[in-house]
Amino acid sequence: MAPKPLHLGVALDGAGWHPAAWREPNSRPAELFTPGYWTDLVTTAEAGLLDFVTIEDSLRTPGEWHDDVRGSADQVRARIDAHLIAARVAPLTRHIGLVPTVTVTHTEPFHVSKALATLDFTSRGRAGWQARVSATGAEAKHFGRREIRDLTAAEHAEALATGTYPAHVPELFDEAADAVEVVRRLWDSWEDDAEIRDVPNRRFIDRDKLHRIDFEGRFFAVRGPSITPRPPQGQPVVTALAHAALPYEFAARSADLVFVTPGRERGPAPVVAQVAAAAERVGRTGEPLRVLADLVVFLDTAAESGAARLARLNELAGAEYRSDAAVFTGSADELAELLTDWGGRGLAGFRLRPGVAVDDLAAITAGVVPALQHRGAFRTGYPDGGLRAVLDLPTTVPNRYATA
């Protein structure tokens, strides 16, 4: 029996996920903050028929969460805004989903709702959102509104191992869940046909089809309605990255897709079971939470094996590369075999993190995608519709405020 077709996206992070990626010959370090660089990456991904690209972002400089920025001048230590990158490439692409990371901890849901709804309009229904919690003291200091205590290395390790966190961390995730709920309600605050645009009768909108959301919670009090009409998808796709019980519960409460990081030794089954248990604990109903596994990939090239490339990059960086996700080195065909195998164990698909953005993305689209297609595990064209259609999510999303 042919395998079920997989969903496949890529996570774009600057020059690549390896800290020395910017030093590779094809990495274009002088162009990292130019529109042309990002347009080339996203159009390459679209040419490979990938479902979506996520664009990494945070409110701190790139690097390990405990790094001291003063001691890392040999790494890229700057970012440009992921949402604005997505907005720039939206008119230049036609099918691929655009999923910027937008943090929820120091932002206002009203602003986030309006920005992502606008992206859905400019992309003609291809917007998504990777909701991210900002849990470091450094990020809090950028705003000066409150203090957040950094986890120690031991607390961080214990959280990943046992799901046990200091008390302030669950509060951050509760706030994040409320933020996503407010955003989703604001997307519904306009009914789909609220815009009349009746010039002779001087009626642009039907006021009866605009709704106050009147959200009152611990962290936000938002009246609504939005000032932006309901997005073309109704509800743009919400995603989250999760590694442990608390983030799994956040994803189950708030997201359509969750990105997880299973290890190579045990495979995805234990993580898939933990996500299912989290969904049961929070009482998720309706559409099941789609689970996609993250892998960092260093693929073979004509000149060098993936393992040799990784070893050389490690030497350039002066340290062995570490990641929250499993690291794959090898050929495109070997990766396709792994994805096909894992795809039968409860995963809806994968999000690949190119170790070197330009080189590994090209290898994914030119090598991995054809290898999956040869196995019957990936489609040969885009379906009609927006990102929800590409991801096999319901394309008609009822509006919670709509009247009969």
Image (spheres, rainbow, N blue to C red):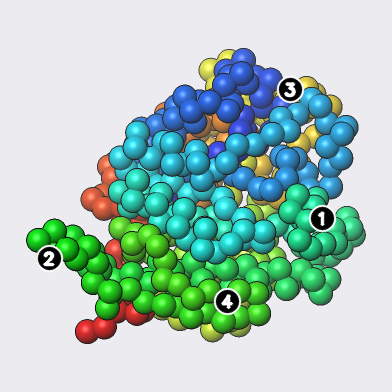
Q: Which residue in the structure is indicated by mark 2? A: 201
CA separation, marks 4 and 3? Answer: 52 Å
Q: Residue 146's image quarter?
A: bottom right
The quadrant holding residue 19 is top right
Q: At label 2, which amino acid type do we have?
A: Asn
Instruction: Return the disc, 1 or 2, that comes first in the chain's sequence.
Output: 1
Q: Nearer the viewer, mark 1 or mark 3?
A: 1
Q: Residue at x 47, y 61 (%)?
A: 113
Between the C-alphas of marks 4 and 2, the distance is 35 Å
Q: Amino acid at mark 3?
A: Arg
Q: Earlier in the sequence, mark 1 or mark 3?
A: 1
Viewer-nearest of discs 4 and 2 = 2
Q: Nearer the viewer, mark 1 or mark 2?
A: 2
Work out whether mark 4 precedes mark 2 in sequence or the reverse, and give the earlier one: 2
Residue at 55% x, 64% y is 109
> Mark 3 — residue?
312
The residue at the point 46 percent across, 53 percent down is 115
Q: Secondary structure at mark 4?
A: strand
Which element carries disc 2, helix, strand or loop? loop
Q: In the image, 230: left or right of 76? A: left
| For residue 288, side relative to residue 60 (left or right) | left
Residue that numbered label 4 is attached to: 221
Q: Residues within 10 Å of mark 2 (few under 14, many from 20)?
A: few
Residue 63 rendering spot, x and y as whole percentages: 75, 40
Q: Are marks 3 and 2 in contact (CB under 8 Å)?
A: no
> What's the amino acid at mark 1?
Gly
